[in-house]
Image (cartoon, rainbow, N blue to C red):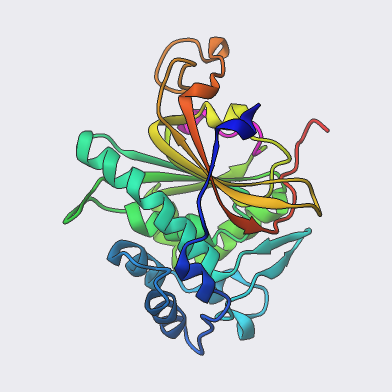
Amino acid sequence: NKSNSINSNPAPKSLMRAWMCHGRTHREMVEKLASAGIARSPICKEALLKVDRKNYVLDPEFAYDDAPQPIGYRATISAPHMHAHVLEDLLPPLLQSSKHKPDKQLSILDVGCGSGYLVSVFGRMVEKERMEPKLNKGKVYGIDVIPQLVEMSRKNILKEDGDLLESDTVQVMVGDGWKGYPEGAPYNAIHVGAAAATFPKNLMAQLAVGGVMVIPVGPDGGVQYLYRVERVGDDGGVVGIGGDDSKIGFLEDDFKVYRVLGVRYVPLVRTDD
């Protein structure tokens, strides 16, 4: 029973100040996220400053409100404080991998890429190698089950972040989040932007050892929590490191699962329902 192995962490104090990081400008929104202690690291703050949220929402008038907004097709763009929280949660495994494997390109997967916003922010984090602290160059894959949202992502990215597509730092495509994207595995970081009814084992198998997945889990319209899934072993096998991926199993002991906080997300859609 997976619930037996879940560690419950109290919500970070900084998130108690969430929902209040509205800005009149892009910079003011990011500065408020920083002063609230949500966007803490210079790397995350810099990436947030480079990607203007107004290019990724339907109504630019509300671009800098600290609230989720509908983007069509029953999807939303998350509130800025949630995006900042996710970035901070996924930065440590990227730094760890860069430290231990200084020549290996990082790989990041954004499941339910929606508007394309978080794909671009991740892209700005890893578009070039950094030295202090050491952060390797990386590739960001964004997938969404809805073709129209993938097209929206691409159009939004092209507005002011098109160089990320041209340099092949980011790539967006149609894909089923339950199945992930084995071609880019193993991943150092996976973000899932929709609630899974259960933990998606195929997706977890695509995490590199030391990699982290941030995912909301719970029934549609019911109690949902944001979880941090950390890969600590490879006894069950890792997708994407050579060999026959079809023979990879799933071993619960390969993962540590932490419950972070209560959330409300749209459901993660399966293509085979």
The residue at the point 67 percent across, 37 percent down is 176
Name the residue nearer the viewer: 160 or 242. 242
**Residue extending farthest left:** 131
In the image, residue 15 lies at what x, y percent? 51, 68
Give the number of callouts: 0
Q: Is residue 21 above or below residue 229?
A: below
Q: Which quarter of the figure is the C terminus placed in?
A: top right
Name the residue nearer the viewer: 155 or 174. 174
Among the 4 quarters of the image, the one containing residue 200: top right
The residue at the point 70 percent across, 56 percent down is 265
Name the residue nearer the viewer: 89 or 144. 89
Determine if residue 85 is in view: yes
The residue at the point 59 percent across, 34 percent down is 180
In the image, residue 19 lies at what x, y percent? 58, 76
- Left or right of 137? Residue 165 is right
Name the residue nearer the viewer: 259 or 156. 259
In the image, residue 113 lies at what x, y percent? 59, 52
Q: Is residue 266 above or below residue 76?
A: above
Magenta-drawn segment: 177-185
- Left or right of 216? Residue 122 is left
The residue at the point 64 percent across, 57 percent down is 262
Q: Is residue 254 magenta?
A: no
Determine if residue 200 is in view: no
Kindly report the secondary structure that dominates the magenta region of the rendered protein.
loop
- Left or right of 213? Residue 112 is right
